[in-house]
Image (spheres, grey):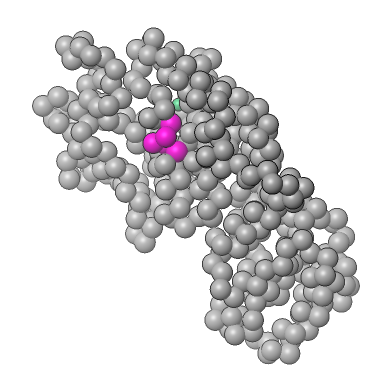
Amino acid sequence: MKICVAGVCTAGKTTLVNTLRKLGYQAYHVAQEHSYVARMWALRRPDFLVVLDCSYETSLKRRAVPWGVAYMEEQRRRLEDARVHCDLYLNTDDMGPGEVVDAVVAAVHKAQIGGSMMPIVNLDVVKKVPEIEIYINKGNDHLGAIGYTEHGPRHANLVANIAHNVLARLGFPQREAELAAIAGYLHDIGNIISRVGHGQAGATMAFTVLRELGMPHDEIAVVMGAIGSHDPEESGHPVNNVSAALILGDKSDVHRTRVRNPDQAAFDIHDRVNYAVEHSFLRVDDRGKTITLELKIDTKISPVMDYFEIFLTRMVMCRRAASFLGCDFGLAINDVRLL
Ligand SMILES: [Fe+2]
Ligand SMILES: [Fe+2]
């Protein structure tokens, strides 16, 4: 779907287009406000036309504009045809950039589903798909059979929450945070096929489910990329914001409740490290632009060095993911900052 964004200067066109593109939408901006050709906006035949507006007073607050109110009115006159034919008109005077994106995404969704009452695909909708619960539980059983820690509903829900919160706290659009929650919930369903390549398998499975739910392909692409890249063996490099949030959520889930082996004497190093972690928390500081994994480890069960031995790759992935979101990554164990 081609989304064309027109509007007066300083209304927020560039920010909106850049964010929509990051979300996977085919969005572009047209300088209709500077053109005498009334239907310039229509040349590329957009599927969805957005017109942004704002008052002259808002313009002055946002940027030192060199023109007066008369030129603003002239821009509006040049935008008249676009305004009459647009699918969504927004006055952004009292809206933040995230609110503008969310309003556009909601309107695009509504248009894509023909204005029917079909809900936007959010985490609650995905959770109601019966087969998803089966895939998560069966994948968890399969990993249990080969000695892995817990990867079941607890892990899926926790990763969904953390991935959502990372983007929400950093001020990304609500819709992008929702996609992170969906990717987080679904990211390990590929384990029903095989642990090796479970990210790619899971991405393919997610495609079928999300398509049947009516999610737009632009968004499915973002979720698939995130699921397919969440594990080191499948690149482990973030490919979009949702992917970065998923990596942070997934790799920060280390806790004693994940250990399934009831026999402490038979613990391997993974069991020992996970069991030693009594508390874990991913702290997101949007002002300081830092994301810190805070752990409380019982060093009688596992020395801190054990943690580094098996989780070094994860920490490298977390650092990359944080950096992708414009943040530094930190690690604090037992109140001592180590990274
Ligand atoms: Fe995984
Ligand atoms: Fe996982």
Residue at 77% x, 47% y is 114
Q: Which residues are magenta?
A: 156-160
Q: Quadrant of the C terminus?
A: top left
Whole-percent x and y of residue 44? 85, 56
Q: In this rendering, would 174 be left or right of 159?
A: right
Quick check: can you spot residue 198?
Answer: no
Between 55 and 225, the one nearer to me in the picture: 55
Residue at 36% x, 61% y is 287
Q: Is residue 158 magenta?
A: yes
Q: Main secondary structure of the magenta part?
A: helix
Whole-percent x and y of residue 51? 73, 67
Quick check: can you spot residue 268?
Answer: yes
Whole-percent x and y of residue 218? 67, 43
Residue at 51% x, 42% y is 180
Between 286 and 324, the one nearer to me in the picture: 286
Residue at 59% x, 75% y is 93
Q: Quadrant of ligand 1?
A: top left
Rendered position, 281 above or below 79: above
Whole-percent x and y of residue 45? 85, 55
